[in-house]
């Protein structure tokens, strides 16, 4: 993942984290973990938290990458063990921007799916993928 793709992804996760007007410590910890795993410094992550990039979805991503992106959003939403309507609405808008059909977020949340990267072919998801 390029640094631009990483900062875009983290920016989406940061904006999702504050969609409910709270930035829970578990959500913040996940943002820092992802940043560190991708060789960003604490200072770079802190600066991104203070001023996240505008939301742009990866235009050149394949379906697997888009599922991974969506999976990260859902995982972050569940990080504080509370699912808020504002967060679901935000993730729905991300899913639509990624080209998924309406209902994928609700399907994934209702079925407890967050880790889509190893095997996106589980029962029922195909109807939401273009």
Image: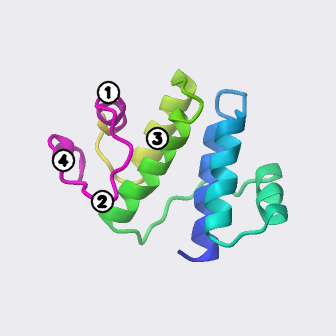
What label sits on residue 55 in the rendered view? none
Mark 1 secondary-structure assignment:
helix
Asked whether residue 54 appears in the rendered view, the answer is no
Q: Position of residue 126 (x, y in %)?
A: 17, 48
Q: Position of residue 99 (x, y in %)?
A: 35, 53
* Quarter location, residue 59: bottom left
| Viewer-nearest residue: 87 or 38 | 38
Q: Residues within 10 Å of mark 3 (few under 14, many from 20)?
A: many
Query: Dot 2 corresponds to which residue?
Result: 118
| Quarter of the view holding residue 96 | top left
- Of callouts 4 and 1, which one flags the residue occurring earlier in the amino acid sequence? 1
Between the residue at mark 4 and the residue at mark 1, the CA separation in whole angstroms equals 14 Å
Q: Which residues are magenta?
A: 105-130
Residue 44 x %, y % = 80, 65
Q: Position of residue 105 (x, y in %)?
A: 37, 36
Q: Is residue 77 above or below residue 56?
A: above
Q: CA distance from mark 3 to mark 2?
A: 16 Å
The part of the image, by quadrant, that contains residue 65 is: bottom left
Q: How many marks?
A: 4
Crowd tier of the residue under label 4, counting other residues whose Cα lies within 10 Å: few below 14, some 14–19, many 20 or above? few
Say left or right for 40 vs 68.
Answer: right
Comparing 81 with 87, the one in front is: 81
Reading the image, the residue beneath label 1 is 110
Give the quadrant of the C terminus: bottom left
Q: Is residue 4 above or below residue 106?
A: below
The residue under label 3 is 74
């Amino acid at each position: 993942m390029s640094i631009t793709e990483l900062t875009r992804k983290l920016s989406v996760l940061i904006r999702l984290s504050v969609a409910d007007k709270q930035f829970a410590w578990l959500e913040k910890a996940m943002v820092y973990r992802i940043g560190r795993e991708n060789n960003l410094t604490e200072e770079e992550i802190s600066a991104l938290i203070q001023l996240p990039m505008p939301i742009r979805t990866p235009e050149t991503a394949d379906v697997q990458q888009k599922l991974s992106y969506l999976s990260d959003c859902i995982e972050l939403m569940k990080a504080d063990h509370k699912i808020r309507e504002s967060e679901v609405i935000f993730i729905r808008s991300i899913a639509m921007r990624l080209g998924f059909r309406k209902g994928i977020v609700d399907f994934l949340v209702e079925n407890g799916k967050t880790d889509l990267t190893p095997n996106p072919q589980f029962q029922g998801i195909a109807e939401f993928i273009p």
